[in-house]
Amino acid sequence: MKTLIRNIDAVVSGRMVHTTLAIDGERLAAAERMQADRIIDGTDLIAVPGFIDTHIHGVGGHGTEDGSEEAILSMSRTLAEAGVTSFFPTIYTDTMERIINDEKAIASASGKEDGASIAGIHLEGPFISPKRIGAQNPAGRLDPDEKALGLMLDAGKGMVKAMTVAPELPGMARIAQICQQEGIVLLMGHTDADYDEALRGMEMGIRHTTHLFNAMTGLVHRKPGAAGCALMNGSMTAEIIADGFHVHPDIVRFVIRTKGSSNVAVITDSLRPTMQKEGILTANGVEVEMGRGLWVTKGNTDLIQGSALTMHKAFTNLVGWGLSLEEASAVTSTTPARIYSLTDRGELLPGRRADIVVMDRDLRIRFTMINGAIACGTAN
């Protein structure tokens, strides 16, 4: 089907323009002289490239810890409601058996989605610091191990695109070398590395950062830590949770403005009960409740389990915190696509996938289009 979305304000190549978007089948196309099968009136609407969430554990009552194809496909459907068009199901550090089972479920689901597309697998560990384990399972944490890496890569069937690691661990240089050969982006996270160890991690090829500031050594004027390494080095990119709870809104804005929107990827790190409408709320086997905008352990609200953020909420947060629509669009779509070499998405340009979020002037989602088809909402 050939579709024209006329008279719409859209973020194109980093600028807001008043334009016509043309969709030819699954791809964006040049609007000139296209004979459309369908015309959508975009008056008073805003279009941005579909959101890309490269760090998400679960949503809608389903998560990677369920270890099932259906759970991943349910995540795909729910994510479209929040404007997500591509995502990396993210696997917790756990026993090798659980990690491999979760990977196999994701690989099995790939290609069967009827919502957001599975763009890769993010392994959050298991080569992480025992001192910064966070909500991960300490029984699954490992020092760098080539055999374990081989098992995980085999189970992922080429879909492992991201791996969170602690650069200070012995043997990490060899793991980094293998991952670079496989085209896997390494992220510095769940790490107790000091500044010098973080710099050595950069030399190994660890050039991205897992949820900046969280589960890592912080920035102190005499001890810059892993966070300082990410902030002060231009060749380091960073993901950040933009819920206003994991990181103060002013710090989120500062990081994006300081490093530039081309070097920061906003993620949700969302857990299984986010957007869940009914039933018992659990995350990685722990019963949770909402507390201070986060998922916390039920009955022990001081023990944080993780994020309840959606990418749409992150986008509206960023705009509410003073960032432009163009900046918000970059960090929620264009930059993550660039970091992970997803060259067919992240921009509203001819030839790219027709992954589009259309919102009204109050930034409420009207519809989400994935591969040229409306996945949720209505066009008129």
Image (cartoon, rainbow, N blue to C red):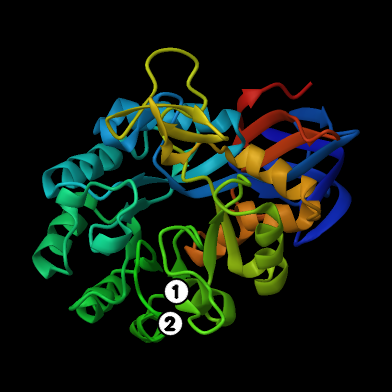
Check if mark 1's residue and mark 2's residue have beta carbons within 8 Å: yes
Q: Quick one: 341 or 360, which is closer to the camera?
A: 360
Residue type at numbered disc 2? Tyr
Q: Is tag 1's residue or tag 2's residue first in the polypeptide sequence?
A: 2
Residue type at numbered disc 1? Ala
Measuring 60% from the left and 64% from the top, which residue is drawn there? 264
Determine the CA span between mark 1 and mark 2: 6 Å
Measuring 57% from the left and 35% from the top, which residue is drawn there? 293
Measuring 62% from the left and 44% from the top, which residue is drawn there? 50
Q: Position of residue 33 (x, y in %)?
A: 83, 46
Element under disc 2: helix
Residue furthest out toward the top:
278
Q: Position of residue 205 (x, y in %)?
A: 37, 80
Element under disc 1: helix
Residue labelled with disc 2: 195
Residue 253, located in which quarter of the rendered image?
bottom right
Position of 169 compared to 356: left or right?
A: left
Which image quarter holds the N terminus?
top right
Q: Position of residue 280 (x, y in %)?
A: 37, 16
* Whether residue 375 is situated above or below residue 124 in the rendered picture: above
* Whether residue 122 is situated above or below residue 305 in the rendered picture: below
Residue labelled with disc 1: 226
Position of 112 compared to 137: left or right?
A: right
Q: Is residue 128 visible?
A: no
Please rate how many residues cluster around mark 1, counting C-alpha atoms within 10 Å: few if below 14, some from 14 to 19, many from 20: many
Which image quarter holds the C terminus?
top right
